[in-house]
Image (cartoon, rainbow, N blue to C red):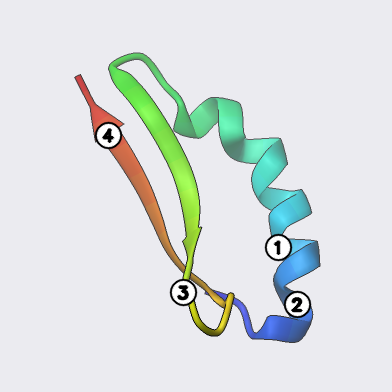
């Protein structure tokens, strides 16, 4: 994941690829942050 200073730019870019990530068979997709630091740490997709 990007360093904290690049996270806003990264989030905008990920919005552009969101529909691709939610391809057929994927019921949930998201980006996740560390609770304490708020840094992006993970991208997950949940299949049916």
Q: Which residue is depicted at the point 55% across and 84% down?
A: 37
Q: Are marks 2 and 3 in contact (CB under 8 Å)?
A: no
Please identify the residue farthest to the top as the structure is shown. 24
Q: In the displayed structure, does residue 35 sit left or right of residue 2?
A: left
Looking at the image, is 37 positioned above or below residue 12? Answer: below
Which numbered disc flags the more N-terminal residue, 4 or 1? 1
- Whole-percent x and y of residue 15? 69, 41
Residue highlighted by disc 4: 46
Nearer the camera: disc 2 or disc 3: 3
| Rendered residue at 61%/77% (across/down) | 2
Q: Earlier in the sequence, mark 2 or mark 4?
A: 2
Q: Secondary structure at mark 4?
A: strand
Mark 4 and mark 1: Cα distance apart in space: 21 Å
- In front of the other: label 3 or label 1? 3
State the residue lying farthest toward the front.
36
Residue on which the image places disc 3:
34
The residue that appears at 33% across and 39% down in the rendered structure is 45
Disc 3 to disc 1, C-alpha distance: 16 Å
The percent position of residue 47, horizontal first and vertical second, equals 23, 27
Q: Residues within 10 Å of mark 3 (few under 14, many from 20)?
A: few
Which residue is identified by label 2?
6
Q: Which mark is residue 10?
A: 1
Q: Nearer the viewer, residue 25 or 34?
A: 34
Instruction: Please state which of the two labelled residues, at mark 3 or mark 4, is closer to the viewer.
Output: 3
**Callouts 1 and 2 close, C-beta under 8 Å:** yes
* Picture layout, residue 35 above or below residue 27: below
User: Distance of mark 2 from mark 4, alpha carbons?
Assistant: 26 Å
Per the model, the C-alpha gap separating discs 3 and 4 is: 19 Å
- Mark 2 Cα within 10 Å, few/some/many (few <14, many 20+)? few
Are dots 4 and 1 in contact, CB under 8 Å? no
Q: Position of residue 17 (x, y in %)?
A: 62, 38
């Amino acid at each position: 994941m990007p360093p904290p200073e690049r996270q806003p730019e990264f989030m905008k870019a990920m919005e552009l690829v969101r529909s691709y990530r939610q391809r057929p068979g994927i019921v949930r997709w998201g980006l996740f942050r560390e609770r304490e630091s708020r840094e992006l740490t993970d991208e997950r997709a949940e299949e049916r």
